[in-house]
Image: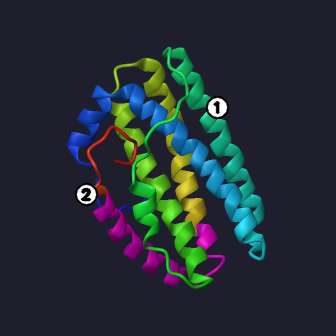
């Protein structure tokens, strides 16, 4: 179901478990960025009216996830703070084609892949964390991350034919696998 061309290497899980608070802080930033990106799509693509309601709902849900993750940070005695982000999203977005509507399709597919990678890694966290509240958090988020992935793919199919969307998703998926493979080895959700 998730359109990933690679799976996460075991060393990511080891690094994440050794740096849980950093992963949690990064996760909060990722949810905030996901909400911001969704809202920016509303401004950038008002002509694609099929995007309006689903994107609004995605933004709302991402903000709710942000609030939830920040609450877990606070419960662990941590504050939400600045953090050097991973280069993952910027490198993934390098695959965007410049012209429209291709750029809109690619943007939606990149967002789908970010959600897919998040889902995969949250599943790994849910399976390996000893901390029960965090296990429960990551287990609770899996369905929505998978749904967000599919929503972005479906939205891309409102702009371009489904066969084109699927082919482009495979291409960008291969690019995403390379980005993940060469990502800096830091404690981040997408590094």
Residue 51 in view, yes or no: no
- Where's residue 173, x and y in %? 38, 68
Q: Position of residue 160 (x, y in %)?
A: 60, 82
Mark 1 = which residue? 67
Which quadrant of the view contains residue 23?
top left
Residue 156 colored magenta?
A: yes
Q: How many marks?
A: 2
Badge 1 crowding class, 10 Å Cα cut-off, few under 14, some 14 to 19, many 20 or more, is some
The image position of residue 106, as x and y in percent, is 52, 74
Answer with the quarter of the image where residue 129 lies.
top left
Residue 167 — which label? none
Is residue 87 inside the magenta stretch? no
Q: What's the residue at 52%, 23% (across, down)?
A: 73
- Tell me which residue sits at (30%, 41%) in the image: 186
Q: Which residue is mark 2?
A: 181
Badge 2 crowding class, 10 Å Cα cut-off, few under 14, some 14 to 19, many 20 or more, is: some
Q: Is residue 139 above or below residue 160?
A: above
Magenta residue span: 154-179
* Position of residue 174 measured from the top left corner of the image (x, y, whole percent): 33, 70
Q: Nearer the viewer, residue 188 or 149?
A: 188
First in sequence: mark 1 vs mark 2? 1
């Amino acid at each position: 179901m998730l359109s990933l061309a690679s799976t996460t290497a075991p060393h990511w899980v080891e690094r994440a478990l050794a740096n849980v608070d950093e992963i949690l802080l990064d996760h909060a930033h990722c949810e905030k960025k996901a909400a911001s990106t969704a809202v920016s799509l509303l401004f950038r693509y008002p002509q694609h009216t099929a995007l309006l309601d689903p994107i609004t709902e995605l933004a709302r849900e991402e903000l709710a996830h942000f609030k939830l993750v920040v609450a877990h940070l606070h419960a662990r005695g941590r504050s939400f703070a600045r953090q050097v982000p991973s280069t993952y999203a910027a490198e993934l977005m390098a695959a965007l084609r410049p012209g429209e509507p291709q750029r809109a399709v690619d943007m939606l597919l990149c967002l789908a892949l970010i959600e897919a990678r998040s889902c995969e890694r949250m599943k790994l966290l849910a399976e390996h964390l000893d901390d029960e509240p965090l296990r429960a958090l990551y287990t609770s988020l899996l369905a929505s991350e998978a749904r967000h992935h599919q929503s972005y793919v479906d939205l891309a199919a409102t702009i371009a034919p489904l066969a084109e969307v699927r082919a482009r998703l495979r291409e960008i998926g291969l690019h995403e696998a390379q980005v993940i493979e060469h990502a800096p080895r830091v404690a981040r959700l997408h590094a």
